[in-house]
């Protein structure tokens, strides 16, 4: 049985750990609120971008020649891009993204397709490197607070590999933010860009008719050549923001559970310490009584 001093040292250690987990929970909660604000600010921009591309797509005569829209007849190579964090202590946030990415890899290899990787986040890069996967690029150091320039760098690398014919499809794997307690793993094709992006429903067509016809300068096809890369960057930036909010939510929940578990451990150790102290006092009383009896005899 552990001594009272040993139990006291362990209680002190657990209390110090609980202070750290509580501080990390508060920091994650503050970062989560800022991440949610950024997502809400991003949505109008993304919606406007979709409307703009839809309007230009209606006016364009032919878009089949645009590089980012080309659907390959046979898919030989797929680029997987898992979005992970730079740090741990976030529950299953990183593990579930990588688990889904490796599951996709097994499915693609079973279909006879090649798989290439692009690492985003230190956790994803280290896991892929440890498992012997060659990376076509890695982007780290920004996952908790991504900037638009980070999305531009990732989008540029994906578009470069796609347009040069090195990959035929690009799949993004990331956590979609639902709530602080729930993050949903999502895999989404980002290249080639679906032709459905250029299509509009009846309500949008009616609204466009009311606004009247537009004269495009330069030609709509040339505008789309410039807009489609921006659309790709916007989609990647939105995914990075979703992933960042999910990471903060997962870390906040994980640290809250850790603090709760530390409190329960402290209660159990305190009870154990009281029992050890009581046993020690009882032992001392018995020794005193035995000594007194020895003196009287």
Image: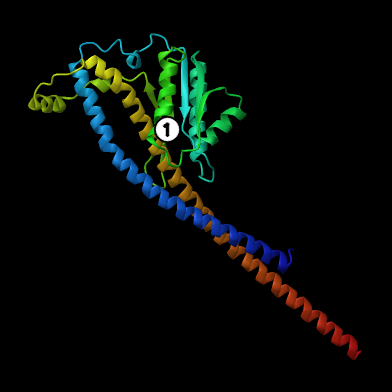
With 2 as the anchor, is 36 left or right in this view? left
Dividing the picture into quadrants, the one containing residue 202 is top left
Q: Could you say which is closer to the camera, residue 1 or residue 50?
A: 50
**Relative to 66, is 146 above or below?**
below
What residue do we see at 70% from left, 75% from top?
278
Using the rendered image of the protein, determine whether residue 276 is visible from the camera's viewpoint: yes
Screen quadrant of the N terminus: bottom right
Task: Establish if 18 lies above or below 55.
Answer: below
| Towards the viewer: 176 or 240 | 240
Q: Position of residue 277 (x, y in %)?
A: 70, 73
Q: Residue 196, percent across and down? A: 27, 20
Q: Is residue 45 left or right of 145 when viewed as pictured?
A: left
Categorize mark 1 by other alpha carbons within 10 Å: few (<14), some (14-19), many (20+).
Answer: many
Q: Position of residue 147 (x, y in %)?
A: 40, 37
Residue sitting at x 86%, y 84%: 291
Residue plotted at (43% across, 22% down): 158
Which residue corresponds to mark 1? 150
Q: Secondary structure at mark 1?
A: helix
Protein image colouring: rainbow
Residue 2 location, x and y as percent? Answer: 73, 63
| In the foreground, 108 or 219 | 219
**Extreme-bottom residue of the structure:** 296
The C terminus is located in which quarter? Answer: bottom right
* Residue visible at 54% across and 46% down in the picture: 89
Q: Is residue 229 left or right of residue 48?
A: right
Residue 186 makes an appearance in the image = no
- Number of labels in the image equals 1
Which residue is most to the right? Answer: 297
Q: In this picture, is 217 found above or below 87?
A: above
Asked if 21 appears above or below 163 in the picture, the reply is below
């Amino acid at each position: 049985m552990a001594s009272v001093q040993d139990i006291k040292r362990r209680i002190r250690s657990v209390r110090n750990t609980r202070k750290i987990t509580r501080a990390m929970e508060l920091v994650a909660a503050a970062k989560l609120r800022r991440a949610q604000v950024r997502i809400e600010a991003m949505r109008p921009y993304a919606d406007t971008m979709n409307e703009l591309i839809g309007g230009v797509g209606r006016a364009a005569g032919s878009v089949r020649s645009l590089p980012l829209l080309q659907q390959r007849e046979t898919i030989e190579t797929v680029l997987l891009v898992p979005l992970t964090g730079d740090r741990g202590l976030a529950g299953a946030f990183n593990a579930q993204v990588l688990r889904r990415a490796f599951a996709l890899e097994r499915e693609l290899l079973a279909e006879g397709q090649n798989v290439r990787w692009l690492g985003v986040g230190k956790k994803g890069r280290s896991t892929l490197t440890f498992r012997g996967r060659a990376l076509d690029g890695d982007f780290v150091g920004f996952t908790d607070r991504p900037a638009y320039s980070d999305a531009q760098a990732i989008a540029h690398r994906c578009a470069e590999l796609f347009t040069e014919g090195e990959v035929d499809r690009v799949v993004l794997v990331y956590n979609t933010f639902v709530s602080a307690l729930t993050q949903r793993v999502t895999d989404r094709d980002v290249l080639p860009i679906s032709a459905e992006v250029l299509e509009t429903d009846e309500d949008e067509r009616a609204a466009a008719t009311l606004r009247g016809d537009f004269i495009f300068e330069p030609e709509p096809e040339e505008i789309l050549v410039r807009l489609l890369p921006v659309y790709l960057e916007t989609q990647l930036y939105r995914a990075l923001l979703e992933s960042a909010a999910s990471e903060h939510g997962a870390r906040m929940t994980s640290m809250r559970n850790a603090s709760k578990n530390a409190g329960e451990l402290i209660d159990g150790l305190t009870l154990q310490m009281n029992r050890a102290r009581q046993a020690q006092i009882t032992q001392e009383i018995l020794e005193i009584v035995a000594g007194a009896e020895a003196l009287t005899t």
